[in-house]
Image (cartoon, rainbow, N blue to C red):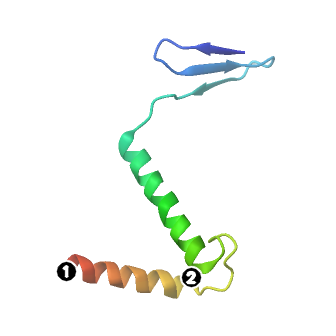
Amino acid sequence: MIHESPDGGKTIKSRETYVIKINTMKDAIVQAVVDKFQQRSEVGIKKYGKTLEQNNDDDYLTHIQEELMDAILYIEK
């Protein structure tokens, strides 16, 4: 059973005594970041033909180190 709570959220009540409150508010900034992650994932899948989850060939620590070094150079630029 789902009930609307006074603050706009939804509360789910089950047969047990547990109550789970679901926040229905959305943050536009968070959503914008999530959208960018989704777009970035699509670019990677198109480029490499697999998801990050499927990629077990990378040396992840070296890869992130190189990416962070590039980021620092862009900041300096």
Residue beneath the point at 72% across and 23% down: 18
Residue 64 in picture, x, y percent from top left:
47, 80
Q: Residues within 10 Å of mark 2 (few under 14, many from 20)?
A: few
Residue 66 in picture, x, y percent from top left:
42, 86
Res 26 → quadrant = top left
State which quarter of the image contains the C terminus.
Answer: bottom left
Which residue is labeled 2 in the image?
60
Residue beneath the point at 66% across and 78% down: 55
Numbered circles on residues, count: 2
* Spatial CA span between label 1 and label 2: 24 Å
In this picture, residue 13 sits left or right of residue 52: right
Res 71 → quadrant = bottom left
Q: Secondary structure at mark 2?
A: helix
Residue beneath the point at 50% across and 88% down: 62
Residue 35 against residue 47 in the figure, above or below: above
Q: Which mark is residue 46?
A: none
Residue closer to the observer: 40 or 74:
40
Residue beneath the point at 67% across and 86% down: 57
Residue 24 in picture, x, y percent from top left:
51, 28
The numbered mark, 1 or 2, whose residue comes first in the sequence reads 2
Q: Secondary structure at mark 1?
A: helix
Residue 70 in picture, x, y percent from top left:
34, 83
Looking at the rendered structure, the kind of residue marked 2 is Tyr
Q: Which mark is residue 76?
A: 1
Residue 35 against residue 1 in the figure, above or below: below
Question: Furthest-left residue in view?
Answer: 77
Looking at the rendered structure, the kind of residue marked 1 is Glu
